[in-house]
Amino acid sequence: MPRKPQQERAKATVAAIVDAGLIVLAREGPAATTTRRIAEVAGIGVGSLYEYFDNREAIHQAMVDRLGTDAAAAIRPMIPELVRMSVRDASLAVLRRARQFLEQDEGRYLHCIRYMTSLVRGFPLRALQSVLSELATQYLIRHPEMARARNLPAMTYVFINGGIYTVIRHLSEEVPSISFDELAQALADMVAFCMQGSLAPLDAPAAAGGDVRPR
Amino acid sequence: MPRKPQQERAKATVAAIVDAGLIVLAREGPAATTTRRIAEVAGIGVGSLYEYFDNREAIHQAMVDRLGTDAAAAIRPMIPELVRMSVRDASLAVLRRARQFLEQDEGRYLHCIRYMTSLVRGFPLRALQSVLSELATQYLIRHPEMARARNLPAMTYVFINGGIYTVIRHLSEEVPSISFDELAQALADMVAFCMQGSLAPLDAPAAAGGDVRPR
DNA sequence: TCAAGTGTTCGGATTCAATTCGGATCAGCC
DNA sequence: GGCTGATCCGAATTGAATCCGAACACTTGA
């Protein structure tokens, strides 16, 4: 029976639990991220964990939510500048900011994110997805001619979801076959190529490799 | 101390364990996929699990490997046909085959794949990645003019990794915001657009939305 | 065919993390 | 102070993962 923290100290406790979870996960790995250890690092008793969380899974969920919210907060203020850039430059700027965000605090979030995919089913960074959707919307408002692009909702879906999880996967790899900068550059190029291709008239000259027009 | 199965019955036991794991995971979910239950469904004693697997995690890993191998086996025979298609059609064909593969046996693999991402860290479908790399290589041999494409290794990385995990994520979503067919169509279009854009001469006319040329 | 030696199976005993629960403590209010 | 609900606590309980030594099955070679 989880309750809502009402008093200040209770809110502090909840925050301490999520903080402790992230700290332990980053420093000691998923095997060490037990309820006892979280409580120990948070400086509270084990029983207190269950005052505000149904179970360990709920704590993990809160940790993921925190990461998503923080990431979103890092990107959101950039939106006004981003909409004034080209799609390629905007994509690149977002990817660079994401990397910077993940590497702050001695890579705490970077370490966490590597384990979180196996901690929480689906690993939904809702807040981050939401901010990137907002960015896409703002970008289209500023560049209405791009709304002509064919299949835009599906492509946006792939840009956002595919982008987030491709980056996470890359950062989780033991021995990446390409560097982060190469990945970021490729992703930014690809977003630009897709917008370009999707906006081109259907009777545009096809490149080598057969018919590249949709449908 | 895990050993290699030497006798036939031991190999059968190992296979039964992996099968049972996949069956239980698909039918009863991750919470029910305990060592006891796997042993029960496999028709063996709990102790036998540890003859060939270090721990439960190793069993999960074997389940993931099995899925990756089976998926790869479903795609590999298509390579000779695929290399004769356009990139778009080939991409679409691979995506359709993947879906068909996942839906066979009443969606057993589909159910499994939804949980596996949280069962095994990194969820590496090595065999599948390997087959798709092979496909890319064969495609380039057959279409040498495409090797001119800028940044090809990084783009291929994104096609393969991004493609696999975007599809998996989509199939894992409770309420997908787009249908699988829309996703497949968009991915195939995007691969085509990227190849087209990447092969286009650098001084090609830029589409709306600013400079879309790399670097 | 038998016996030794190795591979295989088994399931009760052990270990340890997750969760519960009843009571102690604290904050705000009369 | 005395009351009430919120908060905190940690020993006890529960159940899954793992271990281990005995029992059983197969292979070999005499």
Image (cartoon, coloured by chain):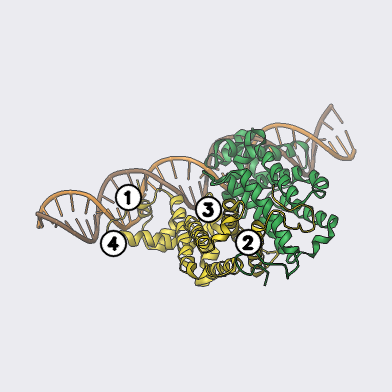
Chain colours: A yellow, B green, C brown, D orange
Look at label 3 and name its amino acid. Answer: Phe
* Residue indicated by mark 1: A3
> SS at mark 1?
loop
State which chain disc 1 sits on.
A
Are discs 2 and 4 less than 8 Å apart at CB?
no
Would you call the spot at circle 4 few (<14 residues within 10 Å), some (14-19), or many (20 or more)? few
Q: Position of residue B70 (x, y in %)?
A: 72, 43
Give the mark nearest the N terminus, 2 or 3.
Answer: 3
Are discs 2 and 3 less than 8 Å apart at CB?
no
The numbered disc on residue B180 is none
Distance Cα–Cα, label 4 vs label 1: 14 Å
* Residue indicated by mark 3: A123
Give the mark nearest the N terminus, 4 or 1.
Answer: 1
Picture quadrant of residue A176: bottom right
> SS at mark 2?
helix
Would you call the spot at circle 1 few (<14 residues within 10 Å), some (14-19), or many (20 or more)? few
- Can marks 1 and 2 be said to lie on one chain? yes
**As rendered, which of A92 and B116 lies closer to the eye?**
A92
The numbered disc on residue A191 is 2
**As rendered, which of D25 and B134 lies closer to the eye?**
B134
Location of the N terminus of chain A (image quadrant): top left
State which chain disc 2 sits on.
A
State which chain disc 3 sits on.
A
* Residue indicated by mark 4: A8
